[in-house]
Image (tube, rainbow, N blue to C red):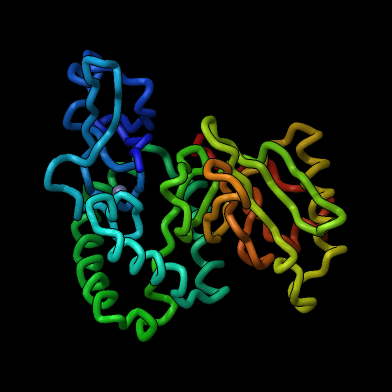
Amino acid sequence: MKIQWAFYDNGNDTEEIYYENLNKKLYESKYQGHLYCISDECDAMIKFTHRQDEVKFFSTWNGQGDLHDIECPYFLHEKGEVERKKILDQIESAPVTDEHILNTILNKSKNLKSKEKREKENKRNTTKRRVQGEQTSRTEKIDNGEINSLGSSMIRIFSLDSKHMTPDYVNYRKCVFGKIKHVYFNEADGYVYLNLDNAQYRVSIYLPQAFYADPEKTTKSALVTFVNKVKQELLALKELVIICVGMIRFKKGSSKDMNVHIISPSHLLINDMKYYEIITSNSINTNPYNYL
Ligand SMILES: [Zn+2]
């Protein structure tokens, strides 16, 4: 696990930094002491190392490993295999209701509509301590094996820009958002890929057969209509931003390509429109977000 992205925050600006784009001189003159974990929810500071042999990497500032949120993959960096597996198992088996997921994506959509980068940073300064307190109590609960008794509403599903997704996030449940680049529908096997923006990895939203397994939620033919609308809008060069909640997995047989598994039509929004709104309307809204 190699940290590849960090937020630069100097009090006036925030910027997303990819480790390969830094060098020792640039880091020391500008970024040192101002880099944070790419997860919005984490307080951990990140440092950059550029060795003589040109090897570059990010790592968590000494002693700050526990300032990563428990839902951040870098929280597990210095933990042993046993604790790693335990936490990932708990994330996977946590009960999450459709209602909770819908609230998560609607909130994210609202935030992306109003949010400037500056606000993201304000959140870091004002609410982090409180979040940290909540995290502590939640960690204890998990250690006692009591997570189920907390109920779905207590499970926080954190968001992740598709651009920042790396294999470190595999086996986490995230609210992933990003621009749709391409749509692929496998007619014979009945699944869909929506490819998202990411410069290093192939990242897709994956709609498996389970997506339409419950005819009360949707059907294969409704999915086909949905896919065709999305295709049409992409052909018309419309910018489509999807927000969805699902488990992140490696694509079968790959250790690089990643899929976000979406198993219900209520777990996604495109340009602030729900699945059925897209099916029943003539076109998809123009991109309402200013996050990019
Ligand atoms: Zn983190």
Front position in the image: 66 or 83? 83
At horizontal 31% and vertical 29% (from top left) the residue drawn is 13
At horizontal 58% and vertical 43% (from top left) the residue drawn is 257
Q: Is residue 229 above or below residue 102?
A: above
Does residue 196 appear to the left or right of 279 in the view shown?
left
> Percent from the top left, x then y, of residue 33?
17, 31
Q: Residue furthest left?
A: 63
At horizontal 26% and vertical 39% (from top left) the residue drawn is 36
> Percent from the top left, x then y, of residue 116?
42, 39
Total number of numbered labels? 0
- Quarter of the image where the N terminus is located: top left
Q: Quadrant of residue 7?
A: top left
> Percent from the top left, x then y, of residue 146?
31, 83
Q: Residue furthest bottom?
A: 149
Front position in the image: 258 or 30? 258
Does residue 158 appear to the left or right of 230 in the view shown?
left
Q: Quadrant of residue 54?
A: top left
Q: Is residue 99 above or below residue 227?
A: below
Front position in the image: 78 or 207? 78
> Percent from the top left, x then y, of residue 292?
51, 34
